[in-house]
Image (cartoon, rainbow, N blue to C red):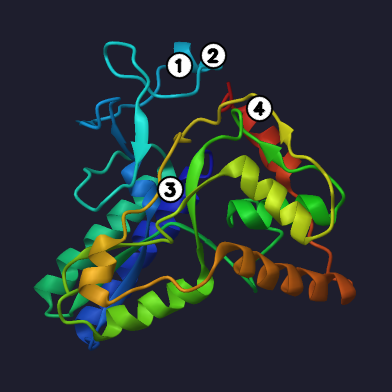
Amino acid sequence: MYQVADYVDVNVRGTAILLEALARRPVQRLVVASSMSVYGEGAYVDAEGRPNRASSRALEQLRRADWELCSDSGARLVPTSTDESKPPELASVYALTKFDQERLCLVLGRAYSIPTVALRFFNVYGPRQALSNPYTGVLAIFSSRLLNNQPPLLFEDGEQLRDFVSVHDVAEACLLALQSEQAVGQVINVGSGEPRSVRSVAQDIASVLKRPIEPELTGKYRVGDIRHCFADISRAQHLLGYRPRMNFQEGLRQLGKFLEAQVQRGDIARDRTLEARRELESRGLTL
């Protein structure tokens, strides 16, 4: 939310430059790595199971540490899986630039007869993930903290629901998107279809790494964050034949082995979490 020019330059202008090159020398298929961030808040239903369009949480509510979304009547809403029909709600600079990137590829792909598929990745994790970049993904951030014997830092109360999908399943989805004719021109969720709380994931990775350190709750809201979002993967199953194969606990074990190998090589991840947090606080981007 503070590196605005860099994000726009890389994600939007960088994609435009690539597409200009592809217009001159078309390829057989273009698959764009879009993001679940374009949804903003995920899908919700009311207590009777009726769909309810959730809006952003009011600042007054967040200052009270009242984290959950409610209907206009004040009743708490229930998060449910998010499908591709949900209109985008662009809550951050990153989300805005990823949506621009997605649309640029689909629009130019159609104009220049380049078959294009946009895959909206949810929270990807797995071996070879960058650990010293505080924006690479929450599991990598938690891992870098734990490997430096520090507690993972959780915004709000840590009960936010997310969808964690193994890099192995993401790679499979990319291969399927290169082959499926039905997928051309479509946006498709790629996730596990299983919601998990951020707090439970922090505890799980601590257990895998044998670092019995409980996460630290900050009780703070980070501007641009959303409460709950996890994937409905029905379209991926129908159009791609996609079936996530990696069990979450097995995926964590594989990530743990990769991290242990890094430690044995003396390649300890640099923990930049506090540095990023100070940047946010200095700009008034946490409440």
Marks 4 & 3, CB-CB < 8 Å contact: no
For marks 1 and 4, the one nearer the N-term is: 1
Q: Secondary structure at mark 2?
A: helix
- What's the residue at 42%, 56% (across, down)? 9
Q: Nearer the viewer, residue 284 or 211?
A: 211
Rendering quarter of residue 103: bottom left
Distance from Cα at disc 1 to Cα at disc 2: 6 Å
Q: Residue under circle 4?
A: 282
Q: Is residue 239 left or right of residue 205?
A: left
- Residue 137 at x, y = what percent? 58, 55
Q: Residue under circle 3?
A: 94
Q: Residue under circle 1?
A: 59
Marks 1 & 2, CB-CB < 8 Å contact: yes
Q: Residue furthest front?
A: 48
For marks 3 and 2, the one nearer the N-term is: 2
- Residue 27 at x, y = what percent? 25, 87
Is residue 41 among what the camera can see? no
> Depth-wise, is mark 1 or mark 4 nearer the camera?
1
Q: Secondary structure at mark 4?
A: helix
Q: Nearer the viewer, residue 243 or 285?
A: 243
Vertical placement of residue 25 versus 194, above or below: below
- What's the residue at 47%, 44% (across, down)? 4
Q: Secondary structure at mark 3?
A: helix
Q: Is residue 48 left or right of residue 143?
A: left
Label 1: few (<14), some (14–19) or many (≥20) C-alpha neighbours in 10 Å: few
